[in-house]
Image: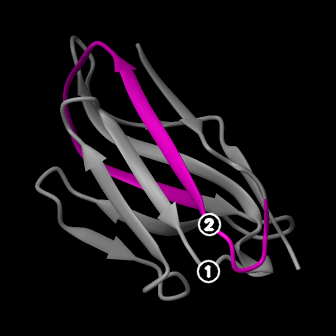
Amino acid sequence: QVQVVESGGGLVQAGGSLRLSCTASGRIVSINDMGWYRQAPGKQRELVAQITSDGSTNYADSVKGRFTISRDNTKNTVYLQMNSLNSEDTAVYFCNCNARVLFVGRRNYWGQGTQVTVSS
């Protein structure tokens, strides 16, 4: 009932920037938190950044000051601006949204992921 689609990943040199986008669509009544997670090879998935419906944000310590999360509630879209990228940022980035869906209720939905590779 809900589709979550990420875009904007790719290959970038260390020190460069990328902007990820994620849009949720379907029978959405409202969206509460939206966030970005990442999973590097051999590691567990970890929270990168999260934003509430009223714009409050939370970041992993490793990305504070380099990444910025934002959202456009009119488009059910969340963004992640990533600056000063380094090799440790290489991972698959997943979008998550906590949405209230018509006839379903509130659930968490995940995107398929987008690969971010930082070359040194």
Displayed quadrant of residue 8 = top right
* 114 on left or right of 22: right
Point 60% across, 38% down: residue: 7
Q: Is residue 13 a member of the stretch shown in magenta? A: yes
Compared to residue 106, the image places residue 84 above or below, namely: below
Point 55% across, 59% down: residue: 37
Number of the label disc, if any, that sits on residue 84: 1
Q: Is residue 27 a member of the stretch shown in magenta? A: yes
Badges 1 and 2: C-beta atoms under 8 Å apart? Answer: yes
Q: CA distance from mark 1 to mark 2?
A: 6 Å
Q: How is the image coloured?
A: one colour
Q: Which residue is nearer to you in this view: 118 or 92?
A: 118
- Local crowd size for mark 1, using a 10 Å CA cut-off: few (<14), some (14–19), many (≥20): some
Q: Which residues are magenta?
A: 12-37
Q: Position of residue 39 (x, y in %)?
A: 70, 61
Sequence-wise first label, 1 or 2: 2
* 14 on left or right of 35: right
Q: Position of residue 23 (x, y in %)?
A: 42, 31
Q: Main secondary structure of the magenta part?
A: strand
Point 16% across, 50% down: residue: 53
Displayed quadrant of residue 104 = top left
Number of the label disc, if any, that sits on residue 17: 2
Question: Label 1 is placed on what type of residue?
Answer: Ser
Compared to residue 95, the image places residue 86 above or below, namely: below
SS label for mark 2: loop
Question: Label 2 is placed on what type of residue?
Answer: Ser
